[in-house]
Image: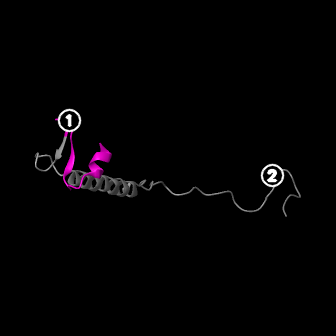
């Protein structure tokens, strides 16, 4: 099918799958195949753009908590009852 269409000199020549014959597709009332391909590419590009935008818009909301709790005090003060541990 592809080889026969490429060999044709007519711009609108193609295969009518419903009637199983080669003909001038525009004269037969079949939509221009170039328009179909162009529309499919435009729709695919639109969907790809939507997916890229959607992916960029998804974000994790910051969590509101009471802040970090206090840490251990600095230095090594030693334990009660153990003298000589203060440096």
- Residue 58: image quadrant is bottom left
Separation (CA) of disc 1 from disc 2: 96 Å
Which residue is nearer to you in this view: 53 or 65? Answer: 53
9 inside magenta stretch: yes
Which residue is nearer to you in this view: 54 or 4? Answer: 4
Label 1 vs 2, first from the N-terminus: 1
User: Residue drawn 58% across and 55% down?
Assistant: 69
* Circle 1 residues within 10 Å: few <14, some 14–19, many ≥20: few
Which residue position holds label 2?
Answer: 79
Q: Residue furthest bottom?
A: 87
Q: Looking at the rendering, in which quadrant would you find the C terminus? A: bottom right
Q: Residue 59 carries which label?
A: none
Which residue is nearer to you in this view: 65 or 5? Answer: 5
49 inside magenta stretch: no
Residue 72: x, y in percent? Answer: 68, 57
Left or right: residue 87 versus residue 30 is: right
Left or right: residue 82 versus residue 16 is: right
Left or right: residue 54 versus residue 80 is: left
Which residue position holds label 1?
Answer: 20
Q: The residue tagged with tag 1: helix, strand or loop?
A: loop
Q: Give the range drawn in magenta.
A: 1-21
Residue 79: x, y in percent? Answer: 80, 52
């Amino acid at each position: 099918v592809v080889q026969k269409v490429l060999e044709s000199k007519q711009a609108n020549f193609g295969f009518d799958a419903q009637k199983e014959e080669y003909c001038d597709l525009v004269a037969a009332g079949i939509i221009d195949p170039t328009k179909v391909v162009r529309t499919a590419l435009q729709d695919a590009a639109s969907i790809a753009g939507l997916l890229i935008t959607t992916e960029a818009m998804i974000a994790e909301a910051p969590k509101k908590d009471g802040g970090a709790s206090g840490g251990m005090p600095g230095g090594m003060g030693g334990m009660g009852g153990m003298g000589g541990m203060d440096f």
